Each structure stands twice: as structure tokens, then as C-alpha cells.
Amino acid sequence: MPVLKKENIILRASVADKTEAIRLAGNILVDQGYVEPSYVDKMFEREALTSTYMGNFVAIPHGTEEARSLVKHAGISVVQIPDGVDFGDGNIAKILIGIAGKNNEHLEILSKIAIVCSEEENIQKIIEAASEEEIIDLLNEVN
């Protein structure tokens, strides 16, 4: 199963708040068979511990350490929110990348995402992408 596929991406999402945004990113992972439904609860637990907002309009919600047992396959979801959503303290996320990894896979996935997202032009391309394929091409390193 690929880590990232077209069905894992939602373009031009509009969400009311951070909770709705995280639930959307998590439910993609559930619906596509990467995680058990209770993984989404662990994403909220993780967010309560410390914000998953990374800067540059990017948030990377993921489960807590004990949530790994709820992961069936490593995968990521991408939610594009052009209007942004407040992640607290005035931090606006326009891209959410939900991560599910078994064992230490999430660290490898995170580092690959970090490399792509370290360049502001890549983030802008993801925010402005008109197709799932454009996002997959940009995040191709992750697969």
C-alpha cells in the first residue's frame, strides 16, 4: 500500500476550526485503511500535549506514541485549506499532513516531509495545487 495516494488528499477544504481540520486529516487515514478509528482520538491527545503546527502554514497532526498499535499501514493524508485554519497563538495552517507510521516509520516520513516543507516555494505550490497529482509529485519523496 503506498504511503500517499490520490484518495488521501483533499483539495480546497473549508473547516470551521482546528478540531474539524484534524478530524478530517485523521478520517482520511481511517477511511483508506491505514489506521483504526480510535487513532483519530490519539491525534487529539497528541495535539493537547503540544501543537503539531510546524510553521510556514504547515501542521502535521499525528497520534501519540501508544497509538502505534492502531496503525495498520504507514500512510499520510494531505488536507489543503487555502483560507487557513487557526492552530492557536495566531498560527494559521493551510496544509495539514496527517501521519500514521508503525515502529519508527513516522520519523522517516516526518524527515522526508520536513525536507519538502523546508522550502517555502514547495509549501506555496501545495497550497495552490489544483490537482492531487501536483501534491503527489511534490511529496513524491515520501512514497
Image (cartoon, grey):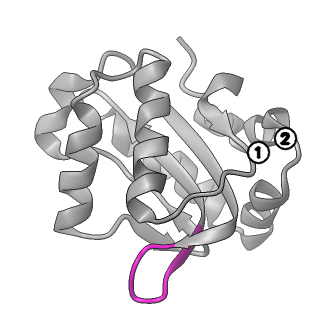
Is 9 situated left or right of 30 in this image? right
Q: The magenta stretch spans which residues?
A: 86-93
Identify the secondary structure beneath mark 1.
helix
Residue drawn at 56 percent across, 50 percent down: 113
Asked if residue 136 lies in the magenta stretch, the reply is no
Residue drawn at 74 percent across, 51 percent down: 12
From the viewer's perspective, is residue 59 above or below residue 89? above
- Depth check: give the residue in front, 71 or 87: 87
* Farthest residue, direction top: 1
Report if the CB atoms under discs 2 and 1 are less than 8 Å apart: yes
Is 40 situated left or right of 64 in this image? right
Q: Are there few (<14), some (14-19), or many (20+) residues within 10 Å of tag 1?
A: some
Q: Main secondary structure of the magenta part?
A: loop
Type of residue at label 2? Answer: Glu
Q: Which mark is residue 134?
A: 2
Q: Which mark is residue 138?
A: 1
Q: Quadrant of the C terminus?
A: top right
- Depth check: give the residue in front, 13 or 97: 13
